[in-house]
Amino acid sequence: MVNINIMSPVDIRELQSTIRKAITNKQKILLKENLELQSLPIDAKTVILDLSSFDKIIELDKENFTVTVEGGINFLEFQIMLAQKGFFFPLDTYASAKTSLSYNVLHGLPSYTLGEYGNYREYVLGLEAVLFNGDHIKIGGKNIKNVSGLDIIGLLIGSKETLGIITKLTLRLLPFPEEKRVLLFNFKELKTALHVTNQLINKGINPAKLHILNASGNSIIKNINLSKSPVVIAEIDGFKASLPRQLDVFKEIISGHISNFSLEITDNNEITNFWNNFREAQYQALINVQNTVSFSCIISEIPEMVAEIEKELVKFEQEFIIQVNGIVGTGMVIPLKKVDNEWISQVAKLIEKYDGKVLGKKSFVNQGLNTIHKKLIDAFDPARISFLGGEEF
Amino acid sequence: MSILKEAKNYELLNTCNKCGFCVQSCSVYKEHLNEAYGTRGRLRLIKAVADGELERTSFYEKIINSCLMCEECSKNCPSGVQGHLLVQMAREDLAREKGLPFTKKLPLEKILPNNKLRSFSFKSFRNFKNIVIRPIPSLHSIRGININSVNIEKEDFLTSYKPLEVSKNSKFKVGFFVGCLMNHTMKEVAHSIVRVLVNEGCEVLAPQEQRCCGTPAHTYGHSKITRELALHNMRLFNEMKVDVIVTGCASCGNMLKNYAKVFKEDNELKDLTLEFSAKVRDITEFLMDDLKISVNKNRNNLVGKVTYHDPCHLVRGQNVTLQPRKILRDIKGIEYIEMPGANKCCGASGMFQYFYPEESMAISNKKIENIKKTNADYVVTNCPACYHRLKGNIEANKLPQKILHIIELLDPGKQIV
Amino acid sequence: MKETQISFLRNIVGNKNICTNKEELLVYEYDATLLKGAPEVIVFPENTEQVSNILAFAYQEGIPVNTRGAGTNLSGGSIPDQGGIALVMTKMNKVLETDFKNGVVVVEPGVINQELQDYLIPHGYYYPPDPASMKACTIGGNIGECSGGPRCLKYGVTRDYVLGMEMVLGTGEVVVIGSKQQMNPDPLDLVKLMVGSEGTLGVFTKLFLKIKKIPEAKKTMLCTFNSVKDASKTVANIISRGIVPTTLEMMDNLLINCAEDFTGLGLDRNADALLLIEVDGFKEELDGQVQVIKEVCEKNYVKEFKIAQSAQEVDQLWTARRTVIGAVARKRPSYSLQDVTVPRNKLPDIVEAIVNISQKYNLPIGVLAHAGDGNLHPLVLFDERNKEEVKKVHEAEFNICKIALSLGGTLSGEHGIGLLKKPYLKQEFSPEVLKLKKQIMLAFDPKNILNPDKILEVGK
């Protein structure tokens, strides 16, 4: 491993000067979290940015249900702190225990709860960022609605560190749901599980979380004795008064398709523990191989697509986890051991066959969009110091 | 000076704050999808003419005359701008400043107001239709108007009307305002109205001297003729000392009720109009609100599904929507189905259908589509103009539905099936 | 524009889809504001190809293109103040595809919001953004402005419901961004950027929208108060009790009276403030929420607390709310409308400030608010023919904007900047942000022909 050049600015001024220096010295810059999650060709010159000094909660505004927080704070710790004060920030990702809030927002990591609670743009009301042109900008505030000019917040979210670094966020909070349940079901076949869960939305059931895993996916569910067949995990939340009926409808849809095992977790602490374990195991699986395929797909195409991936990958004789959020259409294919490029490109090809998109892959095919993209980068990162961005996008 | 510049009128033009709520409610706009054909656009142009920004061009005239007078915009305007009245005002301005074209002048000034000439015209048309049009299918429809489907009476209702015997202590002395179209084309319906009223214990007077209500002249801004007709009709009915004036025509009813508004500043007519207009009732309104009749008996053994089309001049002009529906819901043995868009214009709008055939056709076709959706056996309405437009289109589209005037369902003497 | 340019456009769209009549130019010079500016030609494209050809030509010739839907804009954004082409999208008004399996509908931009709702409701679905003008405005316009509406307190704004679009770039190139997928994994989320871009970045020709199942039950409450302060406190308290109502709408006394004039529903003309509150969800969970809301109202001295008893009553209440902006014209001939937004707990402060401004300038100002999200619509009433008064209106509005910003608010919650709020933009943003916005606009529209100089001055 090369020597790595970690910079830990303590305030905006230091961050700005780090970025300005990178501009002058033609250095590339990226967030520290990337090192674990991806295998990247960094060198000694590369500036590895550690935001851990930006970890303060500036203001928890109980009247407006907003929180203003620095971006370097650990995402999960931030959520725990909010929960202690009785507030709920519903987004939750596989990396939330290990990465900063800014990392999650900048990469737009798909939230486990995307189906019921939506994406980052719905919660980020305001932000501060240091752009790769060296400017420090502030946009938005505590206002739930804001259409003043162009949506730069929306542009920064999910920009994958190509435009700048978010240093502070004002987020909208929600009251906690009165009750929640986690349900686990074994299915005989992955495809059936996907078909069945597809019906949930049409029956008016919108689980907060919904994972469908293939048989190998069992390996990331710890401390629960499951048979080695595909599994569905659902978290359903809501009001005390209506939750029982939601559960009934859910079970009615599922029944008749499940094979042998089902479990209902009702205790809130147990639920928290369950997700902590799940998140940890998924994260470990990811960093173990550093080459997984994340995808997004039209919901109705998922059962066929996943079935084909499952079938076609057999020839590689390589065990892998398929994890799908069935009501949103996002998912991952995680090999259990390192794989070669052929494997990756085969998965990508199958996803694209079903009009799915592989996350992080260049997707602007039009010349016009590429020109626009280049000009946008010119505005935010004229010296091309973003490690993940630059010309190769 | 143009009437548009008169202070009170000009002020009205300035009350529109251009929110645009009226535009989508305009059926003519929906065919053009061009702002000029929506009420907000029309008002902008009227104001431009008032301000001397725009001449009274032929395009302006086309826009102003393209209004259905269906009053949808007026009902949908939060600010209470009466779009249809402002268009009427603009038409009056056009009639004064530019004069009416011959194609409008002849019927409006000469034929419709004159009972004899009108009768003669209808009769001649009847002969022409029977001899020339009927045998030649290509002539059945002129500018989308299915004239072959229009029945024209050999002898009109008023000429043949003989008051039926009534009991001595009749509840109401009713003046029956028949209306030109019903008089010449729907004699049986007029008889039904009389029979139903007499059965309910009313004395019905239908003076032969009654003249056109004035709607066509008023709609195209011919205030002099409108005033003449109004004056004649009001004096006629007032002298008869009737308790109420009943009509089975939505447009006539709307006009008669509006005499009071149209002539509110006409000192000579003021008292007369107030007294007169207060007595006017649509037939369903009179039956349900004044007489409070019970209609749950099926009077002519009708079976099947019925749906109802709201004439513009009844639903918006007079706010009569519940009475006809109550009748249709209450009659035993038939099933009432509400038509989607029941209160949208049928596309007739008097002379509009002749001058704007494409728009009119498209609007009618929407109505036909909505009728199809109901799967009804009968389409019921309450206005001779709508009746003919719907009948013509239903027949041209070879739909199974039969069209009825609402009174026919209440008249045991009427054989429907 | 030159005659040859117009005949080129005529060849693209055909005779029936182009106008140069003086009469028609006059009716495309306005929107729902008081601003004016006539186009030189009006073009009604019928398909993407025509839009593409028009833009390619405009790009080549450097002609301004002002895209427009139903012209209900409240910030002057659709006014062709620099002449050129009025590109009217009303003829592209088809619902192209409904895909209930994926919860997506594909529409052309000229579809009217209400007509989309009417189309979806029989299937048990709806499209949550519901601007007050929904009966009149187009979906394309909603997306251009990122429209809100009463329901967005719980369900979010237009931005949260646009999954993707086919659009034509300033050069005429047709591109698709986003898709029918719930997530957009593109390297930069241009879809979000397009929503609320006010016609300055491109022309939408096809829109992929997210739709939702209609909740099985709802309850609508009407609460009146003796003071606006009590009502605003109620709003903040309801949310801090952990309830997110679908809507939390407020009207002050002036507007209650205007609404009553139009609808005649029997609203309390003496009340100082009215809250229209709606909760929805599963039927079992509503009574509990209504109970909490009632308690909060009572604690804040509610004058009357009423639950709507029938669907018809609910409809009537909403008609009263949706039409009240127009209904103020009953008081004075003109009105001007802002849509400043403040953090919810600053509602009492801004309302108080508005009352002071109203007195200071001697102008009647009505306050209508999507109170739940702090979005206010102060309606200043005046007569546009009185120049002296117009001057006062501008000053009063500038003050309202300044106060909103000083309370941590923003200039526009849902109407956009357009021309009307352009002068105030530098009060809200630093030079760096303004420069960035300008660069973004030039990236999409290098010749500054797409709704030129709206939002901010780009220049040639």
Image (cartoon, rainbow, N blue to C red):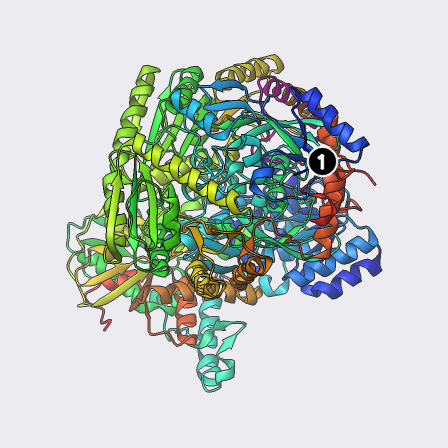
- Residue C436 % position (x, y): 73, 34
Q: Is residue C459 left or right of residue C338?
A: right
**Quadrant of res B334:** bottom left
* Spot occupied by residue B235 in the image (x, y as percentages of width and height): 40, 48
Which quadrant, please, contains the C terminus of chain B?
Answer: bottom left
Residue furthest bottom as drawn? B135
- Disc 1 marks which residue? A46
Pick whichever, A126 or A57, lies toward us: A57
Viewer-side residue, A172 vs C333: A172
Out of A18 and B57, give the one closest to the viewer. Answer: A18
Q: Which residue is drawn at 50% across and 51% down?
A: A337
Does residue C405 show up magenta in the picture?
yes
Above or below, comparing residue A12 to residue C150 in the picture? above
Q: Which stretch appears magenta?
A: C399-427
Residue at point 15% right, 55% down?
B167
- The answer to whether residue B284 is seen in the rendering is no
**Left or right of B261 on screen, residue C243:** left
- Residue C226, relative to residue C441: is it above or below? above
Residue B92 vertical position relative to residue A180 in the rendered view, above or below: below
Is residue C253 in the magenta section? no
* Residue C143 shows up from this direction: yes
Relative side of C164 to C425, left or right = left
Circle 1 crowding by C-alpha within 10 Å: few under 14, some 14–19, many from 20: many
Q: Where is residue C275 in the image (x, y as percent from the top left)?
A: 39, 26
Amino acid type for the residue under numbered disc 1:
Thr
Q: Which residue is drawn at 53% across and 41% down?
A: A109
**For the N terminus of chain B, which image quadrant?**
top right
Chain of the residue under label 1: A
